[in-house]
Image (cartoon, coloured by chain):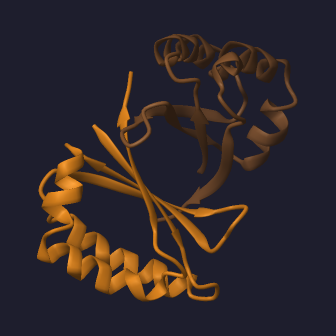
Chain colours: A brown, B orange
């Protein structure tokens, strides 16, 4: 299983709107091939930063299948307006 | 639920030894009050970096209860020798 770890720094003050947009954006994500789930958590030390943990079958399901699809445009249109800076994204392969 | 996100950069070449030490260290962690589980994943873009996602009831269960206990000394003694630099740790409160 691949874990996509995305750190999203949001414009301070827009947290509630971002969380509402993210709830809608999850419906878009749910349609992506190879996608298995998402967990969302808000920073304790940095409350305008969100940790998103997405599960994919393969890295390519995210980087090619999703990012190059119309679904990604919809996803980004919903949540992009709240970004204070570009998200930091890395992939990890679960062990154990 | 609190997610502790720890990024651990390991001395390249010591990944197998680190993973074996981590398996032992998990037995130590399992004894900590307020601890609920850990997921471990290895970096795809940076294969000497590991993402650890630990679940705690509260931030203080980690920062006080665990870190100031003898268990933390045991945990760190097992995995610390493989660190290439100090781990980067942040806490996130799960939403939804």
Image quarter of residue B12: bottom right
Residue A67 image offset from top left, x and y in percent: 81, 32
Which residue is the extreme one toward the front? A12
Front one among B11 and B22: B11
Front one among A81 and B41: A81
Residue located at (51% from left, 35% from top): A49
Residue located at (23% from left, 57% from top): B63
Quadrant where the N terminus of chain B sits is top left
Q: In the rendered image of this protein, does residue A76 appear above or below residue B22?
A: above
Residue A80 located left or right of residue B95: right
Q: In the rendered image of this protein, does residue A8 appear above or below residue A18?
A: below
Residue A23 located left or right of residue A86: left
Residue B14 image offset from top left, x and y in percent: 56, 87
Residue B51 located left or right of residue B24: right
Q: In the rendered image of this protein, does residue A61 appear above or below residue A68?
A: below
Quadrant where the C terminus of chain B sits is top left
Image label count? 0
Residue located at (21% from left, 66% from top): B67
Q: In the rendered image of this protein, does residue A20 appear above or below residue A96?
A: above
Residue A30 image offset from top left, x and y in percent: 62, 21
Residue A2 image offset from top left, x and y in percent: 62, 50
Front one among B37 and B58: B58
Residue A54 located left or right of residue A72: left
Image quarter of residue A85: top right
Residue located at (85% from left, 24% from top): A69
Front one among B30 and B94: B94
């Amino acid at each position: 299983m691949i874990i996509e770890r995305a750190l999203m720094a949001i414009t301070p003050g827009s947290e509630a709107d971002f969380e509402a947009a993210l709830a809608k954006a999850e419906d878009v994500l749910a349609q992506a091939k190879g996608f298995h789930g998402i967990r969302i958590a808000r920073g304790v030390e940095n409350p305008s930063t969100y940790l998103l943990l997405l599960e994919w079958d393969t890295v390519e399901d995210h980087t090619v299948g999703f990012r190059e699809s119309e679904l990604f445009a919809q996803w980004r249109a919903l949540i992009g307006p709240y970004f204070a800076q570009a998200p930091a994204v890395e992939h990890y392969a679960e062990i154990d």
